[in-house]
Amino acid sequence: MRAEVGVLSRNVVYRGNPEDSFPNEYGATIFMHSPGDDSLKFRASDVEFTDVGQAFKLGRYALHMHMIGAVHDSYIQNNAVH
């Protein structure tokens, strides 16, 4: 017997514009940037990202950590990206 298990609800939902994101392939993004000295800390856990990311745009992912150093205290875990 087999089963698939998934989390059906999330605590936080980060959503792009549902009317424009899908047809235009131009959704919301979260862009983190610092001088590279590990001064930025980003933590995302149990978040649902919907209508995110931008097609055919380099570096416009749903979540983008851009040159923020070694990211010792940052993490992205247990998220759902649509």
Image (spheres, rainbow, N blue to C red):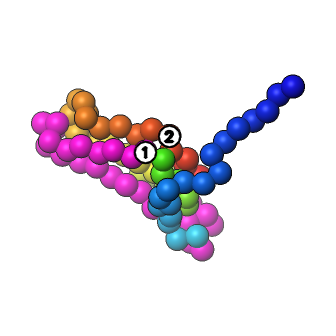
Q: Amino acid at mark 1?
A: Ser
Image-based side of 5 in relation to 75, left or right: right
How far apart in space, not on screen, are marks 2 and 1 (Cα)? 6 Å
Up the image or down, 2 lies above or below 29; here it is above
Range covered by the magenta-colored residues: 19-45
Residue at 55% from the left image edge and 47% from the top image edge: 80
Residue at 28% from the left image edge and 49% from the top image edge: 32
- Residue 58, visible in the rendered structure: no
Callout 1 secondary element: strand
Image-based side of 36 in relation to 26, left or right: left
Image-based side of 58 in relation to 22, left or right: left
**Magenta residue check for 61:** no
Q: Amino acid at mark 2?
A: Asn
Image-based side of 79 in relation to 76, left or right: right
| Screen quadrant of the N terminus | top right
**Magenta residue check for 32:** yes
Q: Sort mark 2 into few (<14), some (14-19) or many (20+) by Cα contacts within 10 Å.
A: few
Residue at 63% from the left image edge and 46% from the top image edge: 7
Q: In this orientation, which residue lies closer to the viewer: 21 or 2?
A: 2
- Residue 51, visible in the rendered structure: yes
Query: Cβ–Cβ below 8 Å for labels 2 and 1?
Result: yes
Q: In this orientation, which residue lies closer to the viewer: 58 or 14?
A: 14
Q: Going by the picture, which residue comes out furthest to the bottom?
A: 19
Query: What residue is disc 1 on?
Result: 45
Residue 4 at x, y = what percent? 75, 35
Mark before the other along the chain sequence, 2 or 1: 1
Looking at the rendering, which quadrant does residue 24 occupy? Answer: bottom right
The label on residue 78 is: 2
Up the image or down, 24 lies above or below 39; here it is below
Residue 35 at x, y = what percent? 14, 43
